[in-house]
Amino acid sequence: MGHHLLGGEPPAPHGVPVFQALLSMARAHRFATDSEVLLVARQVWERCREEASEHLLSSPVGRGMADRDVLAYDTYPDALGAYLARKLHTAVAGPSHATLPWSENTEFKALRSAMTEILSTPTTTRALIADLAVGISTDPAIEMLLQPVFFHKGPLAIATYRCAHTMWLEGNRASALMLHSASADLWGVDIHPGASLGDGIYIDHATGVVIGATAVVEDNVEFMHGVTLGSTGHKTAPGTKRHPTIRSHTTFGCGSTVLGDITVGQGATIAAQAVVTRNVPSGEPLKQI
C-alpha cells in the first residue's frame, strides 16, 4: 500500500470510536443531549490531535500546520476559531497585514476571540458536531477528521456562516457581512448571514453554492457544488420572504437551482442541474419543474 500524501498510511476511520459515535448520531437522525455533544466534541478534537501527530508531524509539508493549528489548542472551538480568523483576516486585510506576528495583530485577535466565543456556545457546538456527523455518514472521501475540520471548504464555509449568522441576529450586521464577503472570496460559497440553517448541513465540494438571505434550511441537508437557493428576481417589498424553505433530510445534486418562496418537502432529492420553481412534495426524487 502506498503512503498517504501527508505521511504514513491512510487511516481506516470507521473503526475509530469517535467516527462510530458520529455515524450513530447521523443514523439516529438526532444529535443527542448537550452533555453527549460536548463529549463527542472532546473526542473529535482528541482524534484530530492524534491524526495531526501521526500524519502531519511526519511530513515537512504538514509539520507547521500540526504545531500551529492543531497541537497548540486544547479544544475544537478554540482551534477552529483561530484557524478561521487567520484565514478570514488575511482575506479582509490583505496579505501585507498577515506579515505582522499573529500575537501582535490586534484585529486578528479580536476576530479570533469573537468567533471562538460563538463556536464555543452549546448551540453552535451542537451544530458543528451535527455537520460533521452528516458529512462522515454521506461522504466516502473522508479518511480522517482533519479533512472536514480543516481541509474541506464546505464545512469551513458553514462554520463561518454560523458565526456570521449569530452576529447578524445580535445586530452586528456589518461584521456579519464582512465575514460573509471574506468567506465567499476564500471558499466560493455565498451563504447570506440572514439565512437560517439548521443542524447537520454538509456541502460537498462546495464551490458555487449560493443561499439567499431569506432561505430557511432545516436539519440534515446535503448539498453538492453549484447549488442555488435563490429568488425569482421579481420585485418584492422589503422584508418579504423571497427564497426557498428546505425541509429536513433533503439532498441537492450539483448545479441544481431552487427559486422563490417555495418549499422542498422532507426527504426530497433534487437532481443535478434541475431548476425548481414550485413546491416539491416530501420524498420526491426530482429532475426538473
Image (spheres, grey):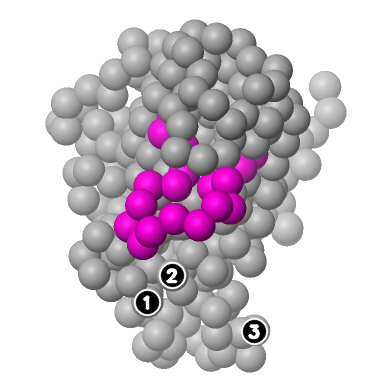
Q: Are marks 1 and 2 in contact (CB under 8 Å)?
A: yes
**In this figure, which residue is indicated by the disc labeled 1?**
174
Instruction: Point out residue 130 in the picture as x, y percentages from the top left corner.
Output: 37, 31
Using residue 34 as the reference point, say whether residue 65 is left or right of it: right
**In this figure, which residue is indicated by the disc labeled 2?**
177
Instruction: Give the crowd class for mark 3: few <14, some 14-19, many >=20 residues within 10 Å.
Output: few
Query: Start and end of the magenta stretch?
Result: 227-246
Instruction: Give the crowd class for mark 2: few <14, some 14-19, many >=20 residues within 10 Å.
Output: some
| Quarter residue 63 falls in | bottom right
SS class, disc 3: helix
Q: Quadrant of the N terminus?
A: top right
Q: Residue at x 63, y 90 (%)?
A: 96
Q: Residue at x 44, y 18 (%)?
A: 265
Q: What amino acid type is highlighted by mark number 2? A: Leu
Whole-number angstrom distance, CA of label 3 to CA of label 2: 20 Å
Q: What amino acid type is highlighted by mark number 1? A: Ala
